[in-house]
Amino acid sequence: MKNFGFVKVAAAIPTVQVADPTYNGAQALALVKQAAQEGVRAVVFPELNLTGYTCGDLFLKPTLLDAAEHALQELLSKTKTLDVVFIVGIPVRAGTVLLNAAAVCYKGQICGVVPKTYLPNYHEFYEGRWFVRAMAFSAETVTLCGQTVPVGTDLIFEAGGFKFGVEICEDLWAVMPPSSAAVLQGADMIFNLSASNALVGKHDYVRQLVAQQSARGLCGYVYASSGFGESTTDVVFGSNALIFENGHELAVSKRFTTSAQLIATEIDVERLRHERAANTSFRTDSALETSAPYEVIELGQPVKPISTLTRRIDPLPFVPSGAELDEHCEEIFNIQVTGLATRLLAAHAKTAVVGISGGLDSTLALLVAVRTMDKLARPRKDIIGITMPGFGTTDRTYKNALALMKQLGVTVKEISIQKACEQHFKDIGHDGKKQDVTYENVQARERTQILMDVANQAGGMVIGTGDLSESALGWATYNGDHMSMYGVNIGVPKTLVKSLVQWVAAHETTQPKTQKVLADVVATPISPELLLADKKGRIAQKTEALVGPYALHDFFLYHFIRGGFSAEKILFLAQHAFAGQFKTAEIKKWLAVFFKRFFAQQFKRSCMPDGPKVGSVALSPRGDWRMPSDASVRAFLEGEK
């Protein structure tokens, strides 16, 4: 069993009694035990949680400081056998000064102390009254609970398969947060102990800070702020805990509760490291030529295998949900339209020629072309839509193609390819009754020839309809539908094409008849319609029955390209994402198909036409993806077995 790079972490929000370290230590112990039971590898607590953040001038009293140190000693004594790192907030005496600090602890040992770098001393905050900032403190060790331990902001802790750094509350709000340096020094995660009081609108701002810092640092960010009992005098604390990974929220606490909370989830360290390896800006910055290396403290925590995940694995990673879906669809559609408009103007094209099959991809390409002409204030008649019935064309797709073109007001052409293909079969000596790859590809190339020649005839350019998923699988006829003069859909995966057509139907189309046609296009089985229909005239050649479900292939594509994952890890993720929908044997079958086709079909991608990149996964040889056409797939399939 492996952990596939996943590390389970947590943010703890205990209830607090201000200036009562004994009570606070007991609350922390309960949450550390809970974290250990849940398989958490590291858990962070709020700022100064052993005393409470709002102790005021009591911080200057030895009685409180002694009690806090005793509470930590008890905590260490009672967690010696627990395999979980915990980070607690405590005021630490260092000679004649006092530090607002985080103590990193594991199995009875204090592994290091990280002091707060920036002390707020404005509005309701008076930390400068009691504590000294980290920059004004030069000692390399402190004595705490009878242990001499490293102290400083330049500490990186190495635990079970990951490295982490620590910062405290205001540090995140600074112009240059300490965590920025920590991630460049190798920290995969940042733990933040906070005591940020609740104000109107502040929660959203904190979420933005955490999201942005985790994205900027290509890291996991675990944030824990004070909970119930901390509120006193003029300030209220709202039990705020957040866990983010590279800008994405994984877990969040319930706010304004009166009970303790532990939020836990897995952070994918492998993916974060892949992102860093691919990001040349991050790699350049990480050299840190003018910065001394941080001290790395090895905690000795073993790597722990993982059998299940508590975080959600999205089965449709290319398709956002909720309000984001509308926003993304609008943006993608506008990217496609803007790209096509630029190409039409640059090429001085009089027309845009689109082959219309009545299927999803050609429908989206036509909708993009229509919106482009509207944007350029040109007549829609400048779009030449050509439907080219072949041997496998069904009435359903044929009628939808014609209806859509007529309702959208484009120039309509119908050119049957049957006689031309039959003649070609005779020319090359092929038996036209033999429905093999030649039978199929002759039709695809005949259609492409018609489109290209009409474009020449009308002073136009052929708009490609193939999408990202087809490009990944090589599901296109080389020098047939594989080729165009500009591929508007080439950056859009199949699972998102459907959402885009539905979005256009809802937001860009006002005619009920057109909306009805678009709805039927979405409901039509995906097919190239190159083989004869069944006896009832229905589509017999269904793409997903041949190459596999596009939901799976898009999932595989996303995690292979975006995450850089092995087949074994992709299988692990897919089992979680598609639990109850696909059996493991099915996933394995189509995963093998994906890798074999992806590698074997690179030669088609090496000479693919231009087209707009719309998301974080793209396969253009001129942009995101460079791969030899003759690479072996063997090593990539070994783990999947």
Image: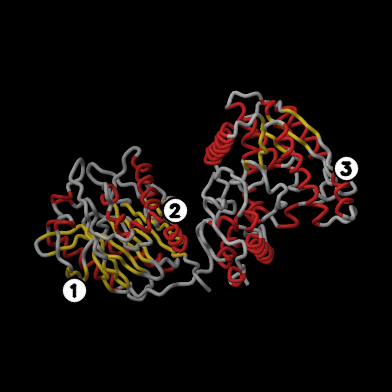
Residue at image x 74%, y 43%? 448
Residue at image x 30%, y 47%? 237
User: What's under tag 1, amino acid-wise?
Assistant: Gly
Q: In the drawing, does residue 161 fall left or right of residue 384?
A: left
Mark 2 or 3, closer to the camera? 3
The residues tagged by marks 3 and 1 sit, at their Cα atoms, a distance apart of 93 Å
- Graded by Cα atoms within 10 Å as few (under 14), some (14 to 19) or many (20 or more), the crowding at tag 2 reads some
User: What's under tag 2, amino acid-wise?
Assistant: Ala
Residue at image x 68%, y 49%? 482
Instruction: Return the x and y of residue 565 as percentages of the image width and height.
Output: 53, 63
| Disc number placed over residue 419 in the picture, else none | 3
Instruction: Return the x and y of residue 574 as percentages of the image width and height.
Output: 60, 60
Q: Which residue is mark 2?
A: 251
Q: In the drawing, does residue 401 fall left or right of residue 350?
A: right
Residue at the limit of the structure toward the left, as seen here = 96
| Disc number placed over residue 146 in the picture, else none | 1
| Helix, strand or loop under label 2 | strand
Which residue is more in the foreground, 636 or 175?
Answer: 636
Q: Would you say residue 266 is visible in this rendering?
A: no
Q: In the drawing, does residue 491 fall left or right of residue 17?
A: right
- Graded by Cα atoms within 10 Å as few (under 14), some (14 to 19) or many (20 or more), the crowding at tag 3 reads few
Which residue is more in the foreground, 421 or 591?
Answer: 421
Assign the C terminus to one quadrant of the image.
Answer: bottom right
User: What's under tag 3, amino acid-wise?
Assistant: Lys
Instruction: Return the x and y of residue 100 as percentages of the image width and height.
Output: 20, 57
Q: Is residue 502 above or below residue 7?
A: above
